[in-house]
Image (spheres, rainbow, N blue to C red):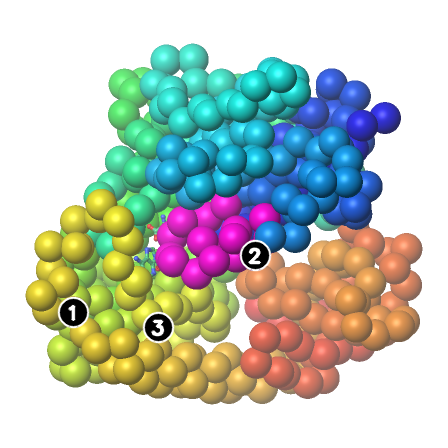
Amino acid sequence: MPRVYIKTFGCQMNEYDSGKMRALLGKDGFEATEELSDADVVLVNTCSVREKPEQKLHSFLGRVLPMKRQRRVTVGIAGCMAQVDGDRLFKKYPNVDLVFGPDAVSRIGEMVATAGTQRVLDTEFLGEEGYPFPSDVDPDASRRVGAFVTIQKGCDNKCTFCIVPATRGEEVSRPLADVLDEVRRLVDTGVKEITLLGQNVNSYGLKVPGHPTFAELLRAVAAMPGVELIRYTTSHPRDIGDDVVDCYRDLPNLASHLHLPVQSGSDRVLRRMKRFYTRAHYLEVVAKLRAVRPDFVLSTDIITGFPGESDADFDETMSLLEAVRFHASFSFAYNARPNTPALRLLDEAIPEAVAQARLERFQARQRQIALEEHAALVGTVQRVLVEGPSAHDEGVICGRTSTFKTINFPGDPATTGTWATVRVTRGFANTLRGERVEGSERVDE
Ligand code: SAM
Ligand code: SF4
Ligand code: F3S
């Protein structure tokens, strides 16, 4: 049986696309392998959101391409960097057999077959009409408690710092029936937690008259037997409506955690980023969510050192952190990306050291907040969905709360996929420690 090895960089979209490639190649008789040295086909799924991932591709290919001297192996570059930089990569790496963007994933079988006789470059964007969302389920999904399901591809926003509209093309919403069908297949393999994926899930369906909305989709997924927990990412703060807030009131299997990227706490910077919401609007959304679920937890994305960001602007980001108390964050210093509108602002570029110092200040305080919030949970009793054995400690398993907290506690890996009731005994910055208690004990909300 031929074997395929897939290396994935980037976000959950890429993880999901890699799963689809495993599934589609599986239909053509390929087996997935985790051993690079075993592989007949090696694919690297790339990210382009910041510059660093590009260096990672280079070093990965430095390990893979010499293998071609010893034996026949097909090597492909997939993903967002392949989409925006396809031609250049095709020329730069003459020993790479195929280069293709995210819209070509559904054609992976034909591309791998063709690459046996000629090199393939496929970076065509596909339109909305009949966009091929593959329905085949990642063969690895059956080994996991949670799985991703894409509901939308692309992004119609034009945030000035962001390369994603150029890598993923225009927004296309996946038909509701397809989404539900994939959720059903996953639940049938034992998956309990579904994470719906899109760059801007709240705009799901809005372009097509009469199309179900995101809130309607949430209700439909929540009603499916076997779906025990629903998460989704990413939400755009401008588009999250009261109909979605109402879902938190009505749907007990909708998780009490939201990743809601704010990027900056300053209205001036948000305007220049073209995010189309204000700090006040963001805080209002948070207040509405906490009004329906007082324990609601938020995490966010932050960019420091966006061109023109003053000390006063950054102070606004710090004060927003205090106001919301984000439990987690993905924060980065601004990184200029090719062909993005913010390049026009580069005459106001912030020195790297300043952007970095702001980043460190943000991260240090955010970590402290996480520690404070986690310390406050010590002694409480939480319900967790058991995800499996801890990666580090023998005899310890880990579970996840609805609020997206990982709790490690002594337990039996055979309980994976069930709910456990756990008392928190210690809090760290990213995880909690706990001990199992009787199921009848009251759970703290
Ligand atoms: N669609 C999501 C949203 O609207 O927030 C995020 C998508 S983007 C792939 C993930 C995160 O990368 C962004 O939220 C942003 O914080 C970060 N990011 C994007 N472009 C960046 C850049 N040029 N420099 C630094 N961080 C960037
Ligand atoms: Fe990028 Fe903005 Fe689209 Fe998110 S919403 S993917 S940050 S353009
Ligand atoms: Fe994701 Fe990176 Fe593409 S963050 S959408 S894989 S540019």
Q: For the residue with label 1, is its CB less than 8 Å from the closest atom of ligand 1? A: no
Q: Earlier in the sequence, mark 3 or mark 2?
A: 2
Which range is magenta? 46-61
Say which residue appears at 59% left-offset and 48% top-offset.
61
Q: Main secondary structure of the magenta part?
A: helix
User: With 128 as the anchor, is 121 left or right in this view?
Assistant: right
Tag of residue 349: 1
438 shown above or below 69? below
Task: Calculate the distance from the C-alpha at mark 3 to the C-alpha at mark 2.
Answer: 39 Å
Tag of residue 324: 3
Quadrant of image for the N terminus: top right
Task: Calculate the distance from the C-alpha at mark 1 to the C-alpha at mark 3.
Answer: 28 Å
The residue to which callout 2 is attached is 59
Label 2 crowd bin: few (<14), some (14–19), many (20+), radius 10 Å: few
User: With 192 as the anchor, is 328 left or right in this view?
Assistant: left
24 shown above or below 35? above
The amino acid type found where label 2 is placed reads Ser
Picture quadrant of residue 366: bottom left
Q: Earlier in the sequence, mark 1 or mark 3?
A: 3
The amino acid type found where label 3 is placed reads Val
Secondary structure found at label 1: loop
Say which residue appears at 47% left-offset and 72% top-offset.
327
59 shown above or below 442? above
> Observer-nearest residue: 177 or 168?
168
Picture quadrant of residue 424: bottom right
